Amino acid sequence: MKLRDLLEASIPGLESNIENTLSPTMIVPELVNSDTYKQYRYVVALAAAKAVANGEVEFNAQSTWNESLAALAYTPEELEIIKIANKLMGVDGVMVSKSKSHEPDDTHVVSPVMKFNMTESMRNTIDKLNDE
């Protein structure tokens, strides 16, 4: 493709052979570059398209989170701070989860790697090497 082809394609009314230089190409004007969330969801839709068409999975155009800010509280005090900040800003928060965070049963919570104990003499040797 030549620069002239691109220029002609960007100016309505000028004759162009750009369509002969591209494989099937589609633009989606509703998905502007300034809205990365919609672009992200579109890519997710591309990945799910065949499975949705075959009735294998469901797809929602927006996730639960949408483009919303998520504020996570690990303690009751942090949740209270979030609620106060919402009130100060005049916004309402939607609780997505009220349960305490925990790992699923199939998640390993103990490292399978053997614990490493460094003796004091090894630590001193490493310190001397780092000082050089």
Image: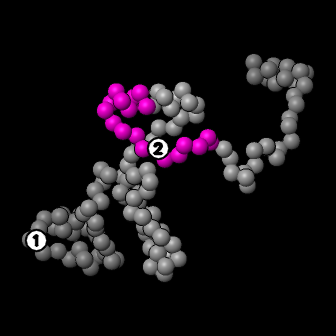
Does residue 125 sit above or below 40 in this rendering?
above
Which one is in front, 114 or 122?
Answer: 114
Q: How is the image coloured?
A: one colour
Q: How many labels were placed on the picture?
A: 2
Residue ID for mark 1: 14
Residue ID for mark 2: 95
Give me the residue at 75% from left, 18% from top: 131
Question: Taking the image as drawn, is residue 85 in sight?
Answer: yes
Overall secondary structure of the magenta section: loop
Q: Position of residue 66 (x, y in %)?
A: 40, 52
Where, by quadrant of the figure, is residue 18 drawn? bottom left
Taking 110 as reference, is 64 left or right?
Answer: left
Q: How far apart are marks 1 and 2 (CA)?
A: 54 Å
* Residue 85 is one of the magenta-drawn residues: yes
Give me the residue at 75% from left, 49% from top: 108
Q: Where's the C terminus, which quadrant?
A: top right
Q: What stretch of residues is rendered in magenta? A: 83-101
Q: Residues within 10 Å of mark 2 (few under 14, many from 20)?
A: few
Q: How crowded is mark 1: few (under 14 residues within 10 Å), some or many (20 or more)?
A: few
Taking 50 as reference, is 7 left or right?
Answer: left
Q: Where is residue 65 in the image (x, y as percent from the top left)?
A: 43, 50
Which one is in front, 57 or 50?
Answer: 57
Q: Which mark is residue 75?
A: none
Give me the residue at 40% from left, 28% from top: 85
Which mark is first along the chain, 2 or 1? Answer: 1
* Residue 29 is one of the magenta-drawn residues: no
Is disc 1 placed on a helix, strand or loop? loop
Q: Which amino acid does label 1 sit on?
A: Leu
Is disc 2 placed on a helix, strand or loop? loop
Give me the residue at 75% from left, 22% from top: 130
